[in-house]
Image: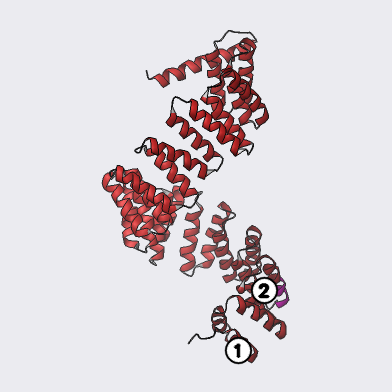
Amino acid sequence: MEGNDFLGEETSNFVQRYEKMLRNRTKDYFEPDAIEMIAEHYLQQEKYKKAESAIHYGLDMYPQHVGFWVKLAEVYLHTDRHDLALVELDKAAIYEPCNSEVYLLKGEVLLGLDDASSAKHCFEKAIQFTDELTDCLFEIGFIFQDHDLFSEAIYYFKEIIKLDVANEQAYYETANCLDLLYRYEEAIALLNQLIDIEPYNATAWYNLGVIHTKLNHFKEAIEAFDYCLVIDETYTVAKFNKANALVEMELFDDAISTYQEVIDEEGEDGITLCNLAGCYERKGDYEQSRTLYKKASLSNPNLAEAWFGIGLTLYKDNKGKDALQFFKRAVLLETDNIEYLMVLGECEFSLDLSNDAMGTFEKITEIDPSFVEAWIDWSFVLYTAADYSGAEQLLRKALSYNPDSYACYYRLALVLQKAGKAKEALVQFEKALQINFEEHNHVFKTYPELTLIPDYLHLVDIYRPKSTD
């Protein structure tokens, strides 16, 4: 029997005996260590009231047992009673001034009170008194991670690397923090440092590929994933991510074969099937793509991407009426997915379901008022219905959220021109030119009637960038 197994069995026996005592309303005798194990069992299960009761039971028998004060402080920490936790830890520090655990926990409590300076002071004491320096440094790093203080966490993880240049976990934790801080180049340098020490470390190569992907260095990412797979051909997640990078490079045939290898090794799952389907979709093979999306929907009926994919391939095959139900199913599963809602709105409009389309675009603007495209499409529905007044009001509302949106100003100018408000239309057109001059070319191409109005051409000449020759 392994030591951990024995400890688990022993704890279980203590817990059963303790709970039997509570049921029988008797009073039994336990050694302090046994009560600490019972309390820890409840803490692990997040049963804080039970943990607190067990500790108080122990304190009735052993009122000066420091371990109970520390455990009680843990309960107070987890239940946001930070001031009470500090009281218990200060008592513990008086009796055991060299107890590293006390200072670790006190530092964590102080971070919960947003007192990072005092917390760091406690952590330095924990480091001073610990017999397990590496473990202590990891613990401090994890505490800072839990409070989203990633720069501080990095410091302690790097201290571990100074002590043990080959400590793999310290590299990964540091790289993870750098990743969360978007400091990708530093993460790459760190992982390369580990690879220089351990060139056959498959996980290091894999993580290097992931970071390169986030920088859109897809060629480098694929190379890193390939090294990972040479070292460990069973590292399927590297193969999956390699396929994703191939898609980004538009090497769809290579991506297809790589996704297929993942399926051959791991079996069919909804996500991989959707990614594979996406490759065929982007190649224009909508029938094969749709077949795979359907497989994905059978594999996982709650996968919105699969239902959306079925709808998209139908929509691209000019089967909007058939596509509509699949878009709605996707939106039902992911109600706040703006991409899905936008395509649903466009589909509804193409099927002359104007009221439904406007309702969909309205929902998008409620989710994200800064999403200009939804305002523009919504205004276009009103514009095509000759409701110029409604379109004008809508676009002015859009501009209240997006005052620098040249697209809204150009569209508002067009709406006002159609409504017979020529002077105001020119004012809005001029604002648009000031923000994005080049976009007027697209506007003129889409609405060539504006080029027949001299005032618009005059404004364009005024704002045309002057030649430097």
Q: Is residue 392 magenta?
A: yes
Q: Is residue 282 left or right of residue 408?
A: left
In the image, residue 31 lies at what x, y percent?
54, 10
**Above or below — where is 201 with respect to 435?**
above
What's the magenta region?
Answer: 388-393
Q: Secondary structure at mark 1?
A: helix
Locate residue 301 relative to residue 233 in the image: left or right: right
The residue lying toward the viewer, choosing from 36 and 88, is 88
Label 2, residues with CA under 10 Å away: few <14, some 14-19, many ≥20? many
The residue carrying mark 2 is 382
In which quadrant of the rendered image does the N terminus lie?
top left
Residue 298 is tagged as none
Determine the main secondary structure of the stretch shown in magenta: helix
Residue in the picture at 50% in, 61% down: 311
The verdict on residue 11 being magenta is no
What is the quadrant of residue 416 in the picture? Answer: bottom right
Residue 229 makes an appearance in the image: yes
Helix, strand or loop at label 2? It is: helix
Circle 2: residue type: Leu
Front position in the image: 142 or 34: 142
- The answer to the question of whether label 1 and label 2 lie on touching residues, with beta carbons closer than 8 A, is no
User: Which residue does the numbered mark 1 point to in the structure image?
Assistant: 457
Q: Residue at x 56, y 52 (%)?
A: 333
In the rendered view, does 319 fall on the left or right side of 232? right
Up the image or down, 361 lies above or below 445; here it is above
Q: Which percent across, then down, holds residue 433?
A: 61, 79
Residue at point 47%, 41% (across, down): 155
The three-letter amino acid code for the residue at tag 1 is Leu
Name the residue located 49 percent from the left edge and 55 percent from the top edge. 305
Observer-side mark, 1 or 2, equals: 1
Residue 437 in the image: above or below residue 169: below
User: Is residue 235 rendered to the left or right of residue 281?
Assistant: left
